[in-house]
Image: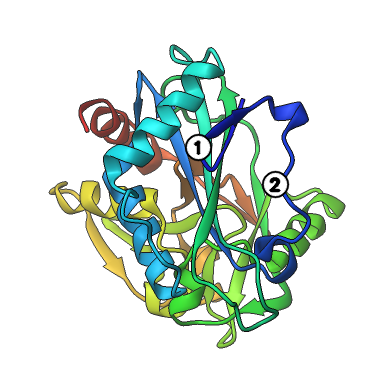
């Protein structure tokens, strides 16, 4: 089932108007949320990120858009999908209502909730080979807009096509200064001994919810120091580990970048902490 502005529709029969500002102009933001154990994981962080993105894009936030209201609408959709006991990927998309061209005639919004069932209720570590490369055909711009989860993802799409054509599992994106920003589908972390490094938001990486959880977890561990600093491509082959984070997969270790093969010791340690936090949070 899908939920379009509060109305439940069969997914295969659901339609939205072709006059849609998300489709025409990418005037849209979304949240991808993991549902497991009967709850939305890290829901508060997702909610505040969504509200922040809507404000930055000057969308009018409806008075009823409280955490409780959106949570209830998602729960209604999950229940109607007979997925209340399952693990799911929830996508909550918001776009500005139709009217105008680049200059909108209204700041009112519409929303869509979609559900996709997942296999495991817990975050797990994949032992499969996972090779990455840099995607250098196009660059992300550093700054605030790149940190938002909008529908403007054409660079990520082209990077994914490049990865598939060249048998890579993922690619890393660069900003206009040719510094590493993020992976195609998540934030990147480098491990060097007791130091764990990730690019700062000012370099243009997504303000990832799992990125925030990792930073919080690492900050409580006495054996590691977290650094939010610019990452040069030359640092990648010097790292002991590389791993990618997002709320659906959790932690994805990189096994190979060019000639460098990586371990995943820290990733496994952090995964255990992440599962505990997800269960208790």
Q: Nearer the viewer, residue 156 or 192?
A: 156
Q: Position of residue 138 (x, y in %)?
A: 72, 77
Above-or-below relation of 155 to 45: below
Q: Earlier in the sequence, mark 1 or mark 2?
A: 1
Quarter of the figure with the N terminus: top right
Q: Quadrant of residue 128?
A: top right
Above-or-below relation of 140 to 216: below
Q: Residue at x 40, y 57 (%)?
A: 50
- Residue 86 lies left or right of residue 224; in this view the side is right
Q: Residue at x 76, y 29 (%)?
A: 13
Q: Nearer the viewer, residue 250 or 100?
A: 100
Quarter of the figure with the C terminus: top left
Q: Quadrant of residue 27?
A: bottom right
Furthest residue to the bottom? 177
**Callout 1 touching callout 2 (CB < 8 Å):** no
Mark 1 → mark 2, Cα distance in angstroms: 37 Å
Furthest residue to the right? 165
Q: Is residue 68 visible?
A: yes
- Residue 58 lies left or right of residue 177; in this view the side is left
- Residue 231 lies left or right of residue 214; in this view the side is right
Q: Nearer the viewer, residue 62 or 47?
A: 62
**Which disc number belongs to residue 96?**
none
Q: Position of residue 187 (x, y in %)?
A: 47, 57
Above-or-below relation of 84 to 118: above
Q: Position of residue 185 (x, y in %)?
A: 58, 52
Q: Is residue 134 visible?
A: no
Residue at image mark 2? 169
Residue at image mark 1? 6
Q: Residues within 10 Å of mark 2 (few under 14, many from 20)?
A: some
Which element is circle 2 on? loop
Q: Nearer the viewer, residue 81 or 247?
A: 81
């Amino acid at each position: 089932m899908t939920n379009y502005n509060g109305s439940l529709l069969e997914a295969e029969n659901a339609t939205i108007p072709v006059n849609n500002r998300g489709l025409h102009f990418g005037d849209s933001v979304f949240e991808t949320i993991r549902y497991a154990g009967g709850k939305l994981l890290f829901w508060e962080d997702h909610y505040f990120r969504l509200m922040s993105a809507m404000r930055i894009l000057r969308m009018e936030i409806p008075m009823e858009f409280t955490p409780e209201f959106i949570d209830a609408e998602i729960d209604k959709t999950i229940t109607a999908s007979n997925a209340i006991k399952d693990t799911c990927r929830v996508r909550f998309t918001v776009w500005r209502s139709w009217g105008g061209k680049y200059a909108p005639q209204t700041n009112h919004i519409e929303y869509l909730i979609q559900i996709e069932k997942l296999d495991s209720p817990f975050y797990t570590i994949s032992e499969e080979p996972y090779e990455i490369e840099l995607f250098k055909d196009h660059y992300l711009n550093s700054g605030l807009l790149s940190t938002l989860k909008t529908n403007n993802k054409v660079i990520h799409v082209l990077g994914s096509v490049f990865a598939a054509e060249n048998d890579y599992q993922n690619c890393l994106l660069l900003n206009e200064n040719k510094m590493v920003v993020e992976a195609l589908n998540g934030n990147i972390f480098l491990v060097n001994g007791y130091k764990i490094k990730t690019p700062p938001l000012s370099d243009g990486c997504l303000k990832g919810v799992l990125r925030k959880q990792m930073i919080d977890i690492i900050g409580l561990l006495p054996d590691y120091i977290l650094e939010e600093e610019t990452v040069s491509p030359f640092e990648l082959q010097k790292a002991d580990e590389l791993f990618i984070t997002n709320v659906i997969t959790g932690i994805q270790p990189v096994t190979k970048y060019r000639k460098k093969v990586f371990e995943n010791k820290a990733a496994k340690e952090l995964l255990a902490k992440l599962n505990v936090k997800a269960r208790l949070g």
